[in-house]
Amino acid sequence: MKLFLDTADIDQIREVLGWGIIDGVTTNPSHVARAGRSPAELFPEICRMVPGPVSLEAMGLDADTIVAEGRALAKLADNVVVKVPVMKEGLIAVRRLAAEGIKTNVTTNFSAVQALLAAKAGAAYISPFVGRLDQVGQDGMTLVSEIRTIYQNYDYQTEIIVAAIRHPQHVLNAALIGADICTMAYDVMSLLYEHPLTDQVMQQFLNDWQKVPQ
Ligand code: E4P
């Protein structure tokens, strides 16, 4: 399973690239706002740093505007994936961009039927937001499971990016379901390394090593 870092923070990207476990980056408008830099300057810098797909979001609300934005974003670098919201105009744009060979990541996905439509439109990726579903009392992982089944039933090649991940259990469940990718914030990715028993055993070994005659 591939892991993407969900951020527009250059320092976080640089650090996590050094961990050797990430395959790409996803950004969203909130991340870009937090970065406090103009997309024209920030986006090419991220694309140069990351040796894998970088999702950059188109903000238009009608298909023509989204297609125009998508074309402009795709010109920034070969690894750009245009993030498009899963709405009717968005999926019209996805089909048109796919016909031009421009990859899209259909985002803000909250239902399996939306994911079916995204695959039919030719999306390269679908991003179900599991943590946000959990927050409103629905099971985000059930959605991932349904999408996996539908894509397998009809042999759609659209890759599933499990998004809005809140904790390592989401990553475990995504891997067990067979999702293609998990994208997560720096803080959640850091947690993937953690287990209290690892700390406990390490502390024991370090203490005992002090008693070994040198
Ligand atoms: C994914 O591509 C999104 O950027 C992200 O996962 C959104 O999730 P959140 O804002 O709920 O964390």
Image (spheres, rainbow, N blue to C red):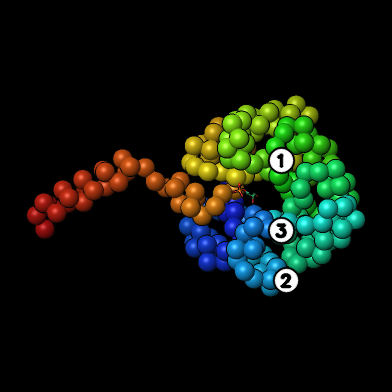
Q: Is residue 202 left or right of residue 105?
A: left
Q: Does residue 52 sit above or below 182 in this rendering?
A: below
Q: Residue furthest front?
A: 136
Label 3: few (<14), some (14–19) or many (≥20) C-alpha neighbours in 10 Å: many
Within 8 Å of ligand 1, the CB of disc 2?
Answer: no
- Helix or strand or loop: what does disc 1 sit on? strand
Nearest the viewer among 150 and 130 is 130
| Marked residue nearer the N-terminal end (1 or 2) | 2
| Marked residue nearer the N-terminal end (1 or 3) | 3
Disc 2: which residue: 40
Q: Is residue 51 visible?
A: no
Q: Quadrant of the C terminus?
A: bottom left
Q: From the top left corner, tell me how far across and down residue 76 is, in percent.
A: 75, 67
Residue at 11% x, 51% y: name it.
Answer: 211
Disc 3: which residue: 56
Q: Is residue 95 left or right of residue 26?
A: right
Disc 1: which residue: 109
Q: Residue furthest left?
A: 213
Q: From the top left corner, tell me how far across and down residue 158 is, in percent.
A: 74, 41
Label 1: few (<14), some (14–19) or many (≥20) C-alpha neighbours in 10 Å: many
Residue at 48% x, 41% y: name it.
Answer: 168
- Helix or strand or loop: what does disc 3 sit on? strand
Q: Are dots 3 and 2 in contact, CB under 8 Å?
A: no
Q: From the top left corner, tell me how far across and down residue 94 is, in percent.
A: 83, 48
- Helix or strand or loop: what does disc 2 sit on? helix
Amino acid type at circle 3 is: Leu
Q: Are dots 1 and 2 in contact, CB under 8 Å?
A: no
The residues tagged by marks 1 and 3 sit, at their Cα atoms, a distance apart of 16 Å
The residues tagged by marks 1 and 2 sit, at their Cα atoms, a distance apart of 27 Å
Q: Is residue 133 left or right of residue 195?
A: right
